[in-house]
Image (spheres, grey):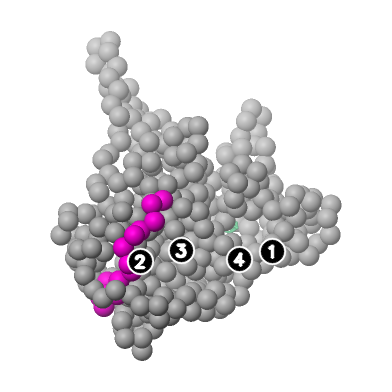
Amino acid sequence: MEALPNTADAGMTRPRLIDDPRDLLRHFLGQGYRILAPQERDGVIDPAPLTEPEALPRGRVDDQGPGHYRLRDGDPDRWFDYVVGPSGWKAWLYPARRKLWSAERTDDRLTFRDATTAWPKTVLFGVRPCELAAIARQRRIFAEGPYVDTAFAERLERSIIVVVQCARSAPTCFCASMDTGPRAVAGYDLALTELPADHGAAFLVESASQAGDDVLHTLGGATARPRDHAAALDLSRAAAARQTRTMPDDIAGGLKLRLESPVWADIASRCLTCGNCTLACPTCFCSDVEEVSDLSGDHAERWQLWDSCFNSDFSFIHGGPVRSSPAARYRQWMTHKLSYWHDQFGSSGCVGCGRCITWCPVGIDLVAEADRLMAEGTD
Ligand code: SF4
Ligand code: SF4
């Protein structure tokens, strides 16, 4: 798994065992950090500001499937048996709406003001391995390309990332076949593994950065033993083995040979072109900018908004949209994500989180459609 550059220095501190993840939250709150952590709101579990460690959704489990998401009670003693919610970390690091600047006209003068808001030092608590991979991919685009989004780069620079390794996979997860999970091996500051109930210790805590080491030093707790690591690896292997969806190995090259497949039209007969899949996807990064002014014409603002390749305006040039049919738009989404992203950015644009499957209102399943396309002959 790729590493985020700001956490490239491997942690030197031996992993520890802790009994209660709230101790870690209390430590960060005591240090004046804002904490964003998974919480239950409006029937989903997604990251939100956390001020009370009790707000972690302990004992809750998410049932996910194509076009389906429900929360239910699980083992009341387990802290992290849910996986990913609809919005995830993208909504924080790269908000759906952001004011870029405003301008005032007074007499003959125009005064421009940068509208970038400060990002307090923040802990991203409970990042899943596939989400960590998605953050790294967005970082490559926003912070390491020729045009740097300084707001995104600063948010990440001022954040500590605490991963929660996955001990459970939802039926929609396929990170194992994308090499992005269910265990993160680098790119975080701290990583928690929730050990089995009969293990004798609740959490293994590993560090992969100086910031993580500093926390481990002050946290206390027993030093982890080889059997704790072995138990953590067993959990990850079991979570991977339970994944029933597998992205075809040769999908990147295979899609390029099937651009005229009849499967595109069949998918389009079900697709609503609503763009939900692109909004939920943690790597999708397309945006538009919009200017608005008040009725007097003395105040104007420029906003950045998420865009989607499913919008007909997205490919509009003089005379009309380049991709006018739903089939062309779905093909654009899937071939960019799974194939052309490799040519552009050196990796897949998919991290196997399964969000596009869960949050598609008609249950279109990216992996099932990829399988179907690959089963078809080439053009
Ligand atoms: S394409 Fe779907 S499964 Fe892949 S990263 Fe995006 S939302 Fe997750
Ligand atoms: S694949 Fe599903 S979520 Fe995506 S645009 Fe079509 S209907 Fe909407």
Q: Amino acid at mark 4?
A: Ser
Against 295, residue 26 (above or below) is below
Q: Amino acid at mark 1?
A: Pro
**Residue 222 lies in the magenta-colored region:** no
Name the N-terminal-most of marks 2 and 3: 3
Distance CA(mark 1)–CA(mark 4)? 8 Å
Q: Which residue, given by chain and number where applicable, does mark 4 sit on? A: 177
Visible in this render: residue 337? yes
Mark 3 surroundings: few (<14), some (14-19) or many (≥20) residues within 10 A: many
2 or 1: mark nearer the eye: 2
Q: Position of residue 8 (x, y in %)?
A: 41, 51
**Residue 15 lies in the magenta-colored region:** yes
Identify which residue is drawn at 21% across, 70% down: 220
Q: Amino acid at mark 2?
A: Glu
Which disc, if any, is residue 184? 3
Q: Secondary structure at mark 1?
A: loop
Q: Which residue, given by chain and number where applicable, does mark 1 sit on? A: 248
Q: Which residue, given by chain and number where applicable, does mark 2 sit on? A: 206
Q: Position of residue 333 (x, y in %)?
A: 62, 50
Name the N-terminal-most of marks 3 and 4: 4
